[in-house]
Amino acid sequence: MAVNHLSFCLSVVLFGCLIMLNDFSLPTEALTRGFIIDLIQRDSPFSPAYNPLAADNFDRLRSAFGRSFSRVDRLYKPTTLLSFSSSSSSSIPIQSKIIPSEGEYLMNVSLGTPPVPVLGIADTGSDLMWTQCKPCTQCFKQNPPMFNPNKSSTYRNIACESKPCSELLESSCDAAAERGGDTCEYRYSYGDHSFTKGNLASDTLTIGSTSLPKIIFGCGRENGGTFDESGSGLIGLGGGPLSLVSQLGKSIGGKFSYCLVPLTSEPYVTSKISFGRAGIVSGPSVVSTPLVAKEPNTFYYLTLEAISVGKKRLVYYHENHNQSKALAGNEGNIIIDSGTTLTFLPVGFHDDLVSALAEAVDAERVSDPKGVLSLCFRAEKESESLASAPIITAHFSGADVVLQPMNTFAKVEDDLFCFTMIPSNDVAIFGNLAQMNFLVGYDLESGIVSFKPTDCTNM
């Protein structure tokens, strides 16, 4: 985890679909035209987790940080294993990652025939979709109804020798193979003891009025750990072969985008995620930076060159094992992640950034009473604090992303404002607070990520 246990995130989430393109005919007109899906904040009245008697926005924000203490360890330092019984396979490391169902943005879809409403979670830092299924040997509590494959006429188990099974890094059969079965079984386990195990399967996913047949997903029979009851599983939007984006592939032109509303927005306002033509980001204010291909291929890597505090430009660097400064200009030195709340930066560079900000902000500096965030200011009015906050610019390769105070400071109490970039000895992450009110577009065919300043509440 990050130094001083400052590994925090929100799981910005949705429940999507995985489609095996070589087995059926897609509704090409709909997919070519593109489609747009609402993302619901966890505390929205549209969410089954909504509690009108819950604490105020400050406590909700703190709770969102608290729900994600182990996120970075789960997402970026897993002890994930594929464990199957097969004459030709053994337990091997796997790069695919999962996240817990304690996210801040939710999506309603339907699974099976007849369709059963499902509420789930997802993230750009994971690949395989899975949901809890009946009969469940060991499952965590969930608010949405649990999917029962026996009641779906279109449910099918995936064979051991199939392509989707082989894309779990190795063709793997479940333990029932010893009893003559031929069902592909998946298992993921993580350093925080979260796990999911079940059959790889396919079924029809319905989004709005569009039905997508033969979705590949994991039908979880044994699941547990730190999962939240507001959802029933997860889906990945990462770059691995079993993700939604990868399996939709050419049918959406490798394009998707999202626009995340600020966490302080009205509860009835939803975010949007778009695929295909609807996911194209264009216009005079768009800036774009190259995606860098690296392993694991689940993650989307960008190159951060510097960060400016007002007109003061700080060259991005990390500290090597000898604690001497080394330029962090290597390509792919930071991950853009819609599922992590805060932005994580190398310790030394973060400290320099905090020093520059402390000099620039004309407000009383205080300590975070929760001991979480490293730079906080006290001000009776928001305007008194943030009005003096300098503009911070993230200088990516070929793209200067100008961040507003709402992207870099969070109001955590009535008169307390804290900087939302924190130090980490682990991977650098450009989190979702920094992405709020930007239309963020991924064009995987062209190999770029684009940013467009946007009022996401009016999307």
Image: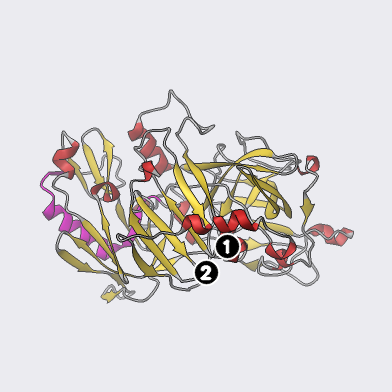
Residue 327 picture location, percent across and down: 28, 75
Question: Image quadrant for the N terminus?
Answer: bottom left
Q: Is residue 125 visible?
A: no
Residue 117 location, quadrant: top right
Left or right: residue 222 versus residue 30 is right
Magenta span: 341-366
Name the one closer to the observer, 160 or 255. Answer: 255
Tell me: residue 22, above or below residue 418: below
The answer to which of marks 1 and 2 sits earlier in the sequence is 1
Name the one closer to the observer, 127 or 457. Answer: 457
Report the residue at 66% width, 58% height from top.
19
Report the residue at 21% width, 44% height from top.
367
The amino acid type of the residue labelled 1 equals Ser
**Dot 1 corresponds to which residue?**
96
The amino acid type of the residue labelled 2 equals Pro
State the count of labels.
2
**Dot 2 corresponds to which residue?**
296
Residue 306 picture location, percent across and down: 25, 68
